[in-house]
Image (cartoon, grey):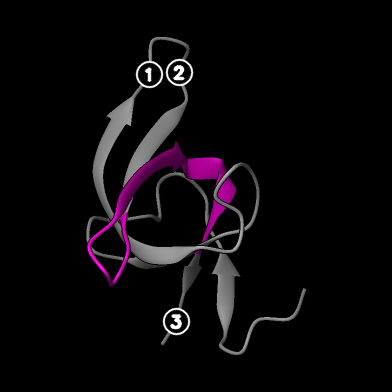
Amino acid sequence: MELPYPQKMMSNNELKDGDFCHVIKGTHKGKTGTATDFNMSKTGHLTITVVQENGNRFKTLGRNVVIVSK
């Protein structure tokens, strides 16, 4: 899948609150939005809440997103 904008793969220490990201895997594949509300789960996985431009929110794993450089 080719994205219309530049992207870079993230490691968990690069993703920051307010970064614009694109979901590349999982249930929400193809959606974009702003990363907020970071949490480390009991199993050690980074979970984030992504807020879309229309205001909808969803949770996903940090490994499922790439940071988008606008």
Sequence-first tag of 3 and 1:
1
Numbered range of the magenta stretch: 51-66
| Residue at 22% over, 62% down | 55
Q: In what quadrant of the picture does the C terminus appear?
A: bottom left
Sequence order check, earlier mark of 3 and 2: 2
Q: Is residue 14 magenta?
A: no
Q: Mark 1 points at which residue?
A: 41
- From the viewer's perspective, tell me whether residue 44 is left or right of residue 9: left
Residue under numbered circle 2 = 44
Q: Which residue is drawn at 47% across and 25% down?
A: 45
Q: CA–CA distance between discs 2 and 1?
A: 5 Å
* Residue type, label 3: Ser
Determine the residue located farthest toward the top in the rendered image.
42
- Whether pointer 3 and pointer 1 mark residues with C-beta atoms closer than 8 Å, the reply is no
User: Looking at numbered disc 2 in the image, what kind of residue is underneath it?
Assistant: Gly
Q: Is residue 54 magenta?
A: yes
